Amino acid sequence: MTERTPDDMTLEELREEIQQIDQELVELIAQRTYVADTIADVKAEQGLPTTDEDQEQAVMDRAGENAERFDVDSNLVKAIFRLLIELNKVEQRESR
């Protein structure tokens, strides 16, 4: 059986594909949040500050590089990562 391309799919099939991708995105966000929470616990145990601007910049740089590699708008990707970072920081502050 050959792999179908989006051009060969019906509107309903395309919508189902989007639903699957959306679920995978949420699962990845959940995984990322779990790891970030674990990092927050390690920081708290070691008495480290919640914010690490160098690390945040490294994440943003990687996000931009990945966006370019996959030909996605880097401003959009960076905005999503900025939101993820800010949400993690809020959770870290609230848990301390």
Image: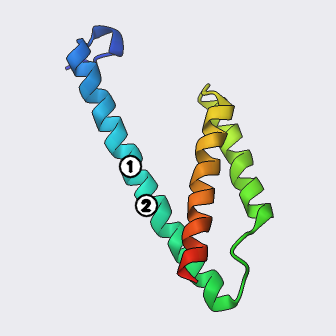
Whether residue 3 can be seen here: no
Looking at the image, the residue that sits furthest to the front is 94
Quadrant, the N terminus: top left
Quadrant assignment, res 69: top right
Determine which residue is flagged by label 1: 26
Quadrant assignment, res 39: bottom right
Q: Amino acid at mark 2?
A: Gln
Quadrant assignment, res 21: top left
Q: Nearer the viewer, residue 79 or 14?
A: 79
User: In the rendered view, does 90 fall on the left or right side of 14?
Assistant: right
Quadrant, the C terminus: bottom right
Residue 65 place in picture, x, y as percent:
70, 39
* Residue at point 77%, 54% (across, down): 57
* Residue at point 34%, 9% (across, down): 7
Residue 25 place in picture, x, y as percent:
41, 45
Give yes or no for contact between labels 1 and 2 (Cβ–Cβ under 8 Å): no
Q: Is residue 32 above or below residue 45?
A: above
Q: Residues within 10 Å of mark 2 (few under 14, many from 20)?
A: few
* Residue at point 54%, 70% (across, down): 91
Q: Residues within 10 Å of mark 1 (few under 14, many from 20)?
A: few
Determine which residue is flagged by label 2: 31
Q: Secondary structure at mark 1?
A: helix
Looking at the image, the residue that sits furthest to the right is 54
Q: Amino acid at mark 1?
A: Val
